């Protein structure tokens, strides 16, 4: 199965235009879209009074089709419109609706509402009756079905500059748009159904993060594999009182399949680490030069979890960069470069991965999140600036590569909001790169497996649970390959 694209509003418009140019009339596409929404509604709701709110454009045209099809299925349907249709296709759909059309007002009685006011292309705040309707519908999102996207949410950013509809079900067409995967838009969509209505193919470098994106190149061991062939990963430990984070990362790397995992520990912390390690090996060092020598032949190094925001951590990052190993730079190893991010960027390459949460992202890329319209754009610009893969954490985690590829996790898991969760993720990334997986795909796969493991456990999850859950996710992926 091909990777699922996420299309911007303009890319979707091009796909629509390509289908029409290839001989499919716009009215046929509108009929298919309306049928897809009517089918989704019929599959989830019993017949009941429905009010379809129609805007002037093609989104409203879809609404007239939905109203007609629901009425033929025995639903009591009412249509309220903002204004007369403004496109020829929407006018044709309005003409086929054989019921009355009332003016949209704030007086909306209890019903199942179909929001067909505005689609993803709206770039201005809702006003007048549309704004009043959006505020009225916000109190009962479980009774709202949005066509394409909840009205008032901007398709390319997921942001709303004024009132917006919140829906329990959103039916979109051909592919998700950024607003379906980025907060707060994603949270206002409810369940998302993607309907194939026969649009043309469109090239995109933005994808849903799922197995379709990376599973064909997942580094399963060959029958002749041995531990050295499966990759050598090291994790740099913090001081004697801050060793747990490195062990979480190391165990994550081992569980995800790295053949040899070693914690490089300050000698003062050797006893603390040794008391808790089994299959993970341990090696002491005192200086950055010792670390560089010891890491000369490793494939990947993870540094940052509880490393300390100190000159020592900065020197250790620079030492590891001189070894040629791929770097996974997390937490303190990001923050330590806050005064001179360019010093870090100068030693990175496309095989390296930065894993900041928004606060750490701000320390390296000051002002970038605020200056860009959405997290995807920010992550892409950061990856280009750093010359490395950037994984921007959050409920809508974005992974971006310097070449412009980007992927968004579409299943945020609240149970992962626990101390140490990110350390395990860093270990997952490092373990996959160690086995030969390309860094962008490794970061995507690790983020997805991490979320799946969190969802599998659910309430009560602590970070120590995550490495032990990875084998169940890997087993399912193995069976689906």
Image (cartoon, rainbow, N blue to C red):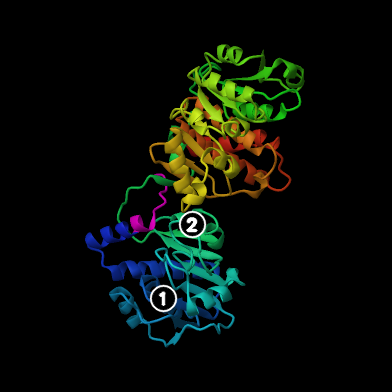
Tell me if 294 is positioned left or right of 418 in this view.
Answer: left
Q: Circle 2: is it few (<14), some (14-19), or many (20+) Cα within 10 Å?
A: many
Q: Which residues are magenta?
A: 1-12
Q: Residue at x 36, y 82 (%)?
A: 84
Magenta stretch: includes residue 5: yes
Q: Which residue is mark 2?
A: 180
Residue 88: percent from the left, percent from the top?
A: 28, 75
Which is nearer the N-term, disc 2 or disc 1? 1
Instruction: Give the SS element for disc 2.
Output: helix
Whether residue 127 appears in this view of the structure is yes
Compared to 327, does 404 lie above or below?
below
Magenta stretch: includes residue 283: no
Q: Residue at x 43, y 30 (%)?
A: 350
Q: Which of 281 and 335 lies nearest the eye of the viewer?
A: 335
Q: Which mark is residue 176?
A: none
Name the magenta segment's main secondary structure: loop
Compared to 255, does 22 lie above or below?
below
Whether residue 409 appears in this view of the structure is no
Tell me if 179 is positioned left or right of 421 in this view.
Answer: left
Compared to 116, does 456 lie above or below?
above
Report how many numbered discs are placed on residues in the image.
2
- The quadrant of the picture occupied by the N terminus is top left
Q: Which residue is mark 1?
A: 55
Residue 291: percent from the left, percent from the top?
A: 60, 15
């Amino acid at each position: 199965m091909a990777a699922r694209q996420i299309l911007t509003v303009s890319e979707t418009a091009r796909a629509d235009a390509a289908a029409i140019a290839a001989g499919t009339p716009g009215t046929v596409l509108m009929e298919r879209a309306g049928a897809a929404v009517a089918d989704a509604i019929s599959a989830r709701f019993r017949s009941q009074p429905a009010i379809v709110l129609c805007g002037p454009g093609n989104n409203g045209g879809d609404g007239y089709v939905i109203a007609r099809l629901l009425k033929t299925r025995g639903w009591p349907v009412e249509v309220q419109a903002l204004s007369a249709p403004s496109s020829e296709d929407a006018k044709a759909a309005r003409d086929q609706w054989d019921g009355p059309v009332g003016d949209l007002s704030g007086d909306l009685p209890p019903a199942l509402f179909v929001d067909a006011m505005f689609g993803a292309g709206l770039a201005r705040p809702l006003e007048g009756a549309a704004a009043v309707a959006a505020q009225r519908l916000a109190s009962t999102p479980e009774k709202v079905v949005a066509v394409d996207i909840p009205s008032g949410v901007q398709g390319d950013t997921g942001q709303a500059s004024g009132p917006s509809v919140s829906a329990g079900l959103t039916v979109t067409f051909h592919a998700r748009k950024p607003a379906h995967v980025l907060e707060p838009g994603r949270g206002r969509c409810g369940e998302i159904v993607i309907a194939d209505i026969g649009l043309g193919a469109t090239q995109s470098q933005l994808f849903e993060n799922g197995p379709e994106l990376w599973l064909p190149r997942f580094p399963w061991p060959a029958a002749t594999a041995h531990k050295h062939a499966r990759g050598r990963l090291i994790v740099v430990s913090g001081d004697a009182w801050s060793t747990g984070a490195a062990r979480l990362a190391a165990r994550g790397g081992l569980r995800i399949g790295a053949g040899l995992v070693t914690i490089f520990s300050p000698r003062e912390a050797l006893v603390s680490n040794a008391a808790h390690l089994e299959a993970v090996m341990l090696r002491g060092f005192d200086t950055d030069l010792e670390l560089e020598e010891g890491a000369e032949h490793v494939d990947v190094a993870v540094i940052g979890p509880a490393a300390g925001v100190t000159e020592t951590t900065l020197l250790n990052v620079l030492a590891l960069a001189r070894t040629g190993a791929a770097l996974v730079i997390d937490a303190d190893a990001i923050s330590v470069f806050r005064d001179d991010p360019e010093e870090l960027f100068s030693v990175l390459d496309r095989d390296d991965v930065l894993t900041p949460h928004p606060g750490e992202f701000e320390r390296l890329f000051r002002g970038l999140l605020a200056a860009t319209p959405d997290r995807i754009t920010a992550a892409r610009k950061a990856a280009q600036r750093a010359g490395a893969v950037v994984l921007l954490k959050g409920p809508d985690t974005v992974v971006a590569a310097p070449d412009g590829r980007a992927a968004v996790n579409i299943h945020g898991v609240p149970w992962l909001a626990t101390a140490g969760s990110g350390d395990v993720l860093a270990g997952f990334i490092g373990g996959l790169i160690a086995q030969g997986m390309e860094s962008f795909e490794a970061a995507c796969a690790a983020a997805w497996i991490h979320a799946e493991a969190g969802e599998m456990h659910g309430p009560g999850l602590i970070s120590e649970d995550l490495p032990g859950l990875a084998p169940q996710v890997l087993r399912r992926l193995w069976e689906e390959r």
